[in-house]
């Protein structure tokens, strides 16, 4: 469970997050959406402790301020993924493994993406898509209870995208809490449960996707959201 | 996370960064530069101490500049990697120290092998005595790496703007290696009628590059040229207390930017 | 001033074994009596032993030879041997412990107003003055080994001290630890050849008011100044080596009020100051080598009409320093290791002139504490800037025909 209580953050006077109150319950699959600069990445980074926010932010009922152990429970797939030049994929895997106390690995997606076969290649020589696969594989590697994925399908081909989505559904069914951002709503509208809509740092809407569709009388999330924003205004 | 675990992580991250840096073309270039400088100065003169004087200029000039620029560039270019590592359950100071040593180790290796290999090539028999002559140079070289890499990281941590960071790096380098001495020279000339020995000792303790230069100079016996000033200097710096002051001062120069860097890094929003 | 007649009697009873036949006297007892009873031109052979002497007076021409180096001791308070006759020769004796006396300039051997004496192959150990010549002529001092141990200049005399002398030859001696190794005052036409003078408390060789003298092939090492030549003219300085005279105010060769002299083919290596010129004129400085000195030459403003030719300057911290904006000396055909010009017509002479005075040497000459910035990047930059746009360094201190190589075949 991730709980936001009165979370605010501003960067040099501009409010990136404005009084967010939100509870992501265990085992839920949440889709985080919002226009550019609406605070999506700040919200994600605040969970990971990358930005320091005002208010109470707790993961599994523990305030995360000044702690880092809780991050053992989180798998994170950042939007842009890079490692120092000249390191091979295997070396990167070895490095990240040494940084977590968890020693049981979920390597399913590693094999499905056939990353084991490019282990000796340098990351810098890989294509953007292949890099993204390594990125995703690391997020799942430690079998974490919470998965946070920032634009996970960006740069992936259809097949890999589907492998990733199937993996996400499977993990969700196993009881993992999932938070995903995507600007392509169709990617996740059928598999996500909740929608979080941010606009200008404020929580505009939070609830079941199902409910939002019903409320707006639409079948597609994209249109439903457009309508919802209009209705609110 | 117990102390042991922390050290293990620190070691691991530093190791991988060293691995990554050591084959970087800049570090290879860095090695080649010092190799060439050492080789050329040894081939120009048969006297190791003379070669050490020539090399000293290269060391005092290049090491701070290269450390500052390479350090800031490294931080900016690897910001995504740093953010990613920060999302792992690792304390921030551990990551910061790893970043620091991951820069220091490859640069220091490039520097040391570059300086020492030619000594070995020229005269393997007298290697130990030649090495002894080079030792003050090597020690201060390492200190300059420590000082200016920690400055580089501090600058990069407090400036998200790359250009500003570079500018600040070059400014700090210019300030400590040229402008400071310019002001020093002007001050010495304006107050020429006063006894300036202790004044100049204080001024040079306050600048790590001057301090390094003086430490090397004293050990190469050039200090006698300084006449009376030299005598005061020699008395001040060449005994145990003087050495302690030099190294305490150099160490403070490492620790201040390092601690400031850690402080800002701990509070930084990525 | 000499303590001739006040000489006290010796402690020992007198015993001499005299062999009248050969005019050779062998003795091991009372020396003074022996000398009294000897005939002029006798040879005295002193057998090995320890003789305590107090101003032992030699007042007739004698040859005094030690057998296996007998020791003549001044017992730390006396003058040892006083020679007041011509044609005295002293050799193979060890003189030790002439006491410190400022009143009498206590010395191991004092020659006063004599001619044609020879002091050869003796050992001098821990004396105040070792060999003292006053108003003497045509003497030879050769192959002596002179060592003293005092640490303070004020408690130490000179190794070989000449005062109002002419035609003295000082050759092949080794001198160490005195105030001045060799000291000349009001001396004329004397030669100092192949001596080695090191670790003296002041100067290796010191000239005062001594004209027309010559010193060559000597080695001066680790003194405050290798040689100091003051208030003299027509001094020939040839093929000497000035080595390691290294200290906060040390000099290889210190010149003060010198004129019409020649400094040729000497080597100056590792001295804080190679040559220091003060009020020095009409002197030729030719074919010398200056290697690894702090300042190879320090030329004070009152020095003029000197000629510097065919010298080679290599690896000195400063080649020349001066306190003047003008130069009245000639620099030509010298080799400068810092010269970076070219020689298109291959005549061995660089095509662009060389300015040997760096900006920093002018700055530091005026303000010594600035030397703390020696070797700093700022100074390198300033030196380069000054080379391109000269403003502080003397405009006419310039070598218009610098040599490309240190040795010059056409010399």
Image (tube, rainbow, N blue to C red):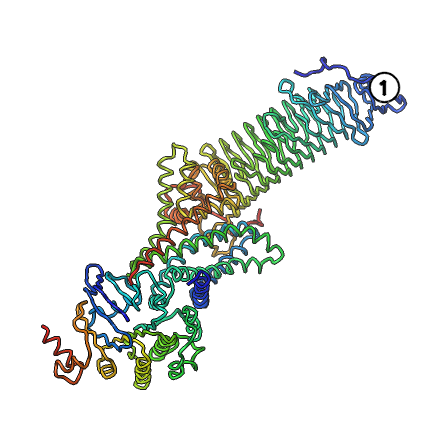
**Callout 1: SS:** loop
Is residue A134 or residue B235 the one in the foreground?
A: A134
Residue C116 appears in view: yes
Is C44 on the left-hand or right-hand side of C357?
A: right
Is residue B16 or residue A34 the one in the foreground?
A: A34
Q: Residue at x 87, y 21 (%)?
A: C18
The mark total stands at 1
In this rendering, is residue C67 above or below B19?
above
Residue C362 appears in view: no
What residue occupies the far front of the structure in this picture?
A61
Is A185 on the left-hand or right-hand side of B50?
A: left
In this rendering, is residue C16 above or below B237?
above
What residue occupies the far bottom of the structure in this picture?
A159
Residue that carries the numbered disc 1 in the rendered image: C15
Quarter of the image that includes the N terminus of chain A: bottom left
Quarter occupied by residue B85: bottom left
Is A150 on the left-hand or right-hand side of C73?
A: left
Quarter of the image that includes the C terminus of chain A: bottom left
Quarter occupied by residue B205: top left
In this rendering, is residue A172 above or below C36?
below
Subunit of label 1: C
Quarter occupied by residue B262: bottom left
Is residue B57 or residue B162 the one in the foreground?
A: B162
List x then y, in percent, for residue A27.
29, 77
List x then y, in percent, for residue B165.
31, 58
- Badge 1: residue crowd in 10 Å (few <14, some 14–19, many ≥20): few
Is residue C108 or residue C383 the one in the foreground?
A: C108
List x then y, in percent, for residue B117.
54, 60
What residue occupies the far top of the structure in this picture?
C6
In this rendering, is residue C101 above or below B187?
above
């Amino acid at each position: 469970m991730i709980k936001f209580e009165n979370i605010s953050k501003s960067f040099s006077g501009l409010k990136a997050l404005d009084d967010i109150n939100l509870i992501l319950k265990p085992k839920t699959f949440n889709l985080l959406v919002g226009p550019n600069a609406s605070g999506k990445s700040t919200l994600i980074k605040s969970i990971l402790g990358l930005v320091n926010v005002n208010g109470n932010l707790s993961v599994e009922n523990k305030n995360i301020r000044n702690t880092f152990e809780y991050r053992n429970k989180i798998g994170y797939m950042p939007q842009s993924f890079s490692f120092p030049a000249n390191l091979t994929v295997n070396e990167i895997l070895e490095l990240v493994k040494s940084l977590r106390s968890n020693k049981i690995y979920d390597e399913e997606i590693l094999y499905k993406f056939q990353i084991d076969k490019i282990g000796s290649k340098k990351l810098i020589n890989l294509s953007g898509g292949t890099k993204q696969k390594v990125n995703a594989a690391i997020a799942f590697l430690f079998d974490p209870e919470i998965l946070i994925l920032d634009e996970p399908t960006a740069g992936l081909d259809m097949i890999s995208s589907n492998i990733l989505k199937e993996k996400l559904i499977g993990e969700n069914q196993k009881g993992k809490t999932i938070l995903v951002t995507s600007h392509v709503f169709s990617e996740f509208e059928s598999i996500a449960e909740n929608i979080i809509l941010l606009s200008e740092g404020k929580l505009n809407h939070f609830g079941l996707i199902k409910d939002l569709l019903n409320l707006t009388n639409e079948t597609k999330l994209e249109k439903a959201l457009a309508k919802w924003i209009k209705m609110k205004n | 996370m117990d102390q042991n675990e922390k050290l293990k992580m620190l070691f691991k991250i530093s190791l991988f960064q060293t691995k990554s840096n050591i084959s970087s073309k800049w570090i290879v270039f860095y090695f080649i530069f010092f190799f060439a400088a050492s080789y050329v100065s040894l081939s120009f003169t048969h006297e190791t101490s003379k070669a050490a004087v020539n090399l000293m200029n290269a060391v005092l000039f290049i090491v701070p500049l290269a450390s500052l620029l390479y350090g800031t560039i490294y931080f900016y270019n690897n910001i995504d990697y740093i953010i990613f590592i920060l999302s792992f359950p690792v304390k921030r100071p551990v990551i910061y120290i790893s970043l620091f040593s991951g820069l220091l180790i490859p640069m220091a290796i490039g520097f040391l092998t570059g300086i020492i290999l030619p000594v070995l090539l020229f005269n393997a028999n007298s290697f130990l005595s030649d090495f002894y002559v080079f030792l003050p140079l090597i020690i201060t070289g390492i200190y300059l790496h420590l000082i200016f890499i920690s400055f580089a990281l501090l600058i990069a941590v407090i400036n998200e703007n790359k250009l500003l960071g570079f500018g600040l790096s070059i400014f700090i380098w210019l300030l400590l290696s040229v402008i400071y001495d310019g002001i020093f020279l002007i001050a010495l000339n304006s107050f020429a009628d006063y006894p300036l020995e202790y004044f100049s000792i204080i001024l040079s303790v306050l600048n790590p590059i001057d301090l390094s230069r003086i430490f090397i100079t004293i050990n190469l016996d050039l200090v006698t040229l300084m006449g009376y000033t030299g005598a005061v200097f020699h008395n001040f710096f060449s005994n145990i207390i003087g050495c302690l002051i030099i190294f305490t001062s150099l160490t403070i120069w490492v620790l201040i930017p390092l601690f400031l860097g850690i402080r800002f890094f701990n509070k930084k929003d990525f | 001033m000499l303590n001739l007649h006040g000489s006290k009697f010796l402690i020992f009873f007198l015993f001499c074994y005299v062999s009248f036949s050969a005019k050779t006297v062998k003795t091991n007892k009372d020396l003074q009596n022996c000398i009294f009873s000897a005939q002029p031109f006798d040879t005295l052979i002193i057998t090995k032993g320890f003789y305590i002497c107090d101003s032992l007076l030699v007042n007739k021409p004698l040859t005094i030879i030690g057998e296996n180096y007998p020791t003549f001791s001044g017992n730390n308070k006396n003058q040892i041997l006083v020679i007041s006759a011509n044609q005295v020769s002293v050799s193979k004796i060890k003189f030790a412990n002439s006491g410190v006396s400022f009143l009498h300039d206590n010395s191991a051997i004092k020659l006063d107003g004599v001619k044609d004496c020879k002091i050869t192959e003796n050992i001098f150990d821990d004396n105040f003055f070792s060999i003292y010549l006053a108003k003497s002529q045509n003497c030879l001092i050769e192959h002596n080994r002179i060592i003293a141990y005092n640490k303070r200049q004020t408690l130490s005399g000179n190794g070989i001290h000449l005062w109002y002398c002419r035609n003295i030859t000082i050759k092949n001696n080794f001198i160490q630890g005195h105030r001045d190794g060799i000291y000349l005052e009001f001396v004329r036409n004397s030669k100092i050849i192949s001596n080695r003078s090191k670790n003296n408390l002041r100067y290796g060789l010191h000239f005062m008011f001594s004209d027309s003298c010559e010193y060559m092939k000597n080695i001066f090492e680790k003194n405050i100044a290798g040689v100091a030549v003051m208030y003299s003219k027509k001094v020939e300085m040839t093929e000497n080596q000035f080595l390691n005279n290294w200290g906060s105010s040390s000099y290889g060769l210190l010149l003060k009020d010198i004129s019409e002299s020649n400094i040729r083919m000497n080597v100056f290596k590792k001295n804080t100051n190679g040559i220091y010129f003060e009020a020095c004129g009409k002197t030729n400085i030719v074919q010398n080598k200056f290697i690894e000195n702090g300042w190879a030459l320090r030329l004070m403003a009152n020095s003029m009409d000197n000629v510097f030719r065919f010298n080679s300057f290599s690896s000195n911290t400063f080649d020349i320093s001066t306190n003047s904006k003008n130069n009245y000396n000639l620099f030509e055909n010298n080799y400068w290791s810092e010269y970076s010009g070219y020689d298109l017509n291959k005549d061995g002479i660089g095509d662009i002139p060389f300015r040997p005075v760096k900006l920093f040497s002018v700055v530091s000459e005026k303000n010594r504490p600035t030397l703390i910035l020696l070797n700093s990047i700022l100074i390198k930059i300033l030196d380069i800037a000054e080379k391109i746009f000269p403003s502080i360094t003397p405009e006419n201190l310039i070598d218009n025909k610098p040599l490309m190589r240190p040795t010059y075949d056409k010399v």
